[in-house]
Image (cartoon, rainbow, N blue to C red):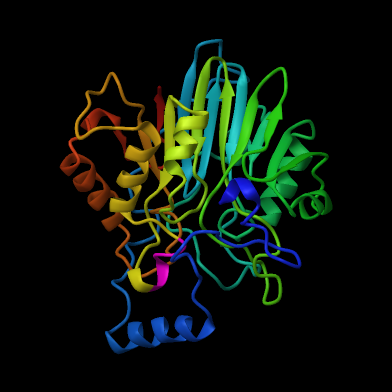
Amino acid sequence: MSDTGAHHRPGGGFRNPWPESELHGFKDFLKWRLDEWRHGGRVPSPPAGSLPTRQPAIAKPRAARGHLSATWVGHSTVLLQLGALNVLTDPVWSDRASPLRWIGPRRLMPPGVAFDALPEIDVVLISHNHYDHLDATTVERLAKRFPGASWLCPLGLAGLLRSWGVRTIEERDWWQTVDTPAFRATCTPAQHFSARGLGDRNDTLWCGWTIESDDARVYFAGDTALHPVFTAIGGRLGPFDLVMLPIGAYAPRWFMRAVHMDPDDAVTAYRALIGAPAALDGSTVPPCLALHWGTFRLTDEPVSEPPERFNRAWCDAGLPESACWIFSHGETRLF
């Protein structure tokens, strides 16, 4: 499986190594859009800026030892404060998730943390190269403002990051680790794909990350479908103090199943990660922060549907409501 290099494509590049993980092609994409048109199009998005927001509670310039918090900036961007270590996941502050400024998915909500309000950033975790997870303008701004930050990315992305001004880059394959005096991070398997243009599909790797600092362990799944390695991730790298999973961009299911989890899949993945029986209390399970919804409209489901379905699936699984974290943009919670 992933341990034997099966995710490396013969001749170069990468692939998902599991059954039923084959990606849909351009003809299927056209079928999706045609079906959407035949059925009257998507449910309209809510007005821009209309979802709930919170005022972030960020410790600046750094938190004290023992302070553990997560702040949702939006989509898959989270500011983690692990004691004195400040970490960003898949940072995107631009208005569009697109190579062009005038077309492509536009933010429904502004970033929950203003760029100028960020504390000193020490580590940036990158999961893959899609525009809603790796934004050139944001990378350039971060690299200029925080030149000493360490950027952790999957195989194949170091050159691109370097071209945008990033100085310190650690590139890893699945299961490989970055060990420093301040933190330990491990690149984890994910089921997805990569591309920034028409001719580079799967030339670079995709992944999740775990990061350990200040006696805390956090798992960031990146962008992924449900796959059979979540149990191994939890067994080898857990137990976790915080789990962050994507729950949105899943409809139509026949097209998106191979690359994105839906809310039910996210609950299944969570239970695999923590080895959960049917019911546990809130003192024995880590909180699960729901990501990848409410910021960019990428697929057909209504904007408000992912968190509603995730909460329902969570409760149906007998998991404690206190560990189901559905944030407003900008919200901070301690863990």
Magenta part of the chain:
255-259
Q: Is residue 116 visible?
A: yes
- Whether the magenta-drawn stretch holds residue 5 is answered as no
- Judging depth in this view, the residue of 55 and 127 nearest the camera is 127
Q: Residue 241: x and y, percent? A: 43, 24
Quarter of the figure with residue 163: bottom right
The picture places residue 235, in percent across and down from the top left corner, at 46, 31
Residue 330 visible, this orientation: no
Q: Is residue 17 above or below residue 152?
A: below
Examine the rendered structure and indicate whether residue 84 appears above or below residue 40. Answer: above
Residue 24, percent from left and from top: 49, 75
Residue 250 location, quadrant = bottom left
Query: Above or below — where is 176 with respect to 252?
Result: above
In screen coordinates, is 248 left or right of 229? left
Q: What residue is drawn where x is 27% and y is 48%?
A: 310
Say if the magenta span includes residue 258: yes
- Who's the residue at 23% across and 42% down the image? 314
Magenta span main SS: loop
**Left or right: where 328 falls relative to 16:** left
Hey, which residue is sitting farthest top in the picture?
65
Number of numbered markers: 0
Q: Residue at x 34, y 82 (%)?
A: 36
Q: Where, quadrant-wise, is the C terminus in this rendering?
A: top left
- Picture residue at 67% right of the left edge, 49% below the top: 138
| Image location (x, y in percent) of residue 127 | 60, 48
Q: Is residue 199 left or right of residue 147?
A: left
